[in-house]
Image (spheres, rainbow, N blue to C red):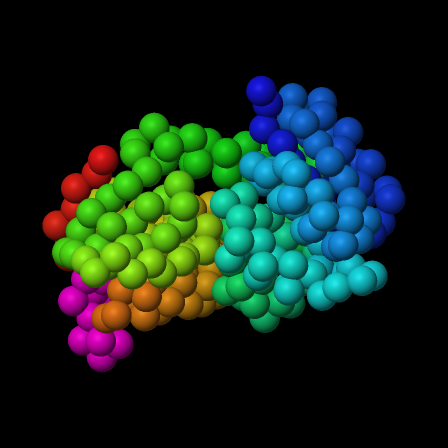
Amino acid sequence: MSALVTILDDEPQIRTLLSEALTEAGFRTAAYARATEFEAALRSATPDVCLVDLGLPDRDGLAVVHRLALESGAAIIIISGRAQVQDRVTGLELGADDYIIKPFDPAEVVARVRARLRQGKSREQAGNTAGFNGWTAHFDRYVLVDDAGEEIGFSHAEGEVLRLFLDAPKRLISRQQMQETLGGAAGESFDRAMDVRISRLRTKLREDPKNPQLIKTIYGAGYIFLGDVSWS
């Protein structure tokens, strides 16, 4: 069955434009004008990718993004007319995987949806559970479990960064490599979003922020994950 892409945007023309482009590309689509309708639909169908506008009539779009990041395994792409760097940073910090500014070319949206799905498919094939240094990461459930059995949830966006580290332990990962692997536009907003995600991962892994032992920053070069990793 083809992937399901949901569209949350209060502009009828945008919903129609995206629905037609995605359907022509072979995706199933469902479009909603209000957050309440969208969230009600999530109870009966789990999308693979969510396209979310920030200017919604009944709810703050950023709040919708944040809730999706915490509760859903779907990839999240913001589509918004807000073009300021701080808007993009905030969206990415709250858990979005990508940010597209209106007006846009529908072909670009289709390409970014495909890129997100390719990343998810390659990770599923590689395995969904990794153990490292007393922790177990379950990417199918988006939880970390410590050696005492306590569970700590992580967002889809945080999981992308964690998976990148776990796939390449004890190897330098540059900012450019992160951008090429995770997608999105390079620049200040991407760099700041990565900093926030890595900081949150360190907190969840109970790292000393002044002297982290697992995720080490190599200033001017990137990051190295120093754990011993086994996949299952």
- Residue 171, percent across and down? 17, 50
* 229, above or below 84, in the image: above
Q: Which image quarter holds the N terminus?
A: top right
Q: Which image quarter holds the C terminus?
A: top left
The structure residue drawn at horizontal position 16% and vertical position 67%, both measured from the top left corner, is 213
Horizontal side of residue 33 vs 128, given as left or right: right
Horizontal side of residue 47 vs 132, given as left or right: right
- Residue 174, percent across and down? 29, 54
The structure residue drawn at horizontal position 37% and vertical position 53%, both measured from the top left corner, is 143
Q: Identify the image quadrant of residue 82.
A: bottom right
Given residues 133 and 123, the one toward you in this image is 133
- Residue 178, percent across and down? 36, 50
Q: Main secondary structure of the magenta part?
A: loop
Magenta stretch: residue 184 in it? Answer: no
Given residues 150 and 51, the one toward you in this image is 150
The structure residue drawn at horizontal position 36% and vertical position 60%, both measured from the top left corner, is 152
Tell how many labels. Answer: 0
- Residue 78, percent across and down? 63, 52
Residue range (magenta): 208-217
Given residues 37 and 187, the one toward you in this image is 37
Q: In the current view of this chain or complex, which residue is farthest to the front? A: 149
* 195, above or below 225, in the image: below
Q: Is residue 19 visible?
A: yes
The structure residue drawn at horizontal position 53% and vertical position 48%, both measured from the top left corner, is 72
Horizontal side of residue 19 vs 231, given as left or right: right
Q: Is residue 174 visible?
A: no
Q: In the current view of this chain or complex, which residue is farthest to the right? A: 12
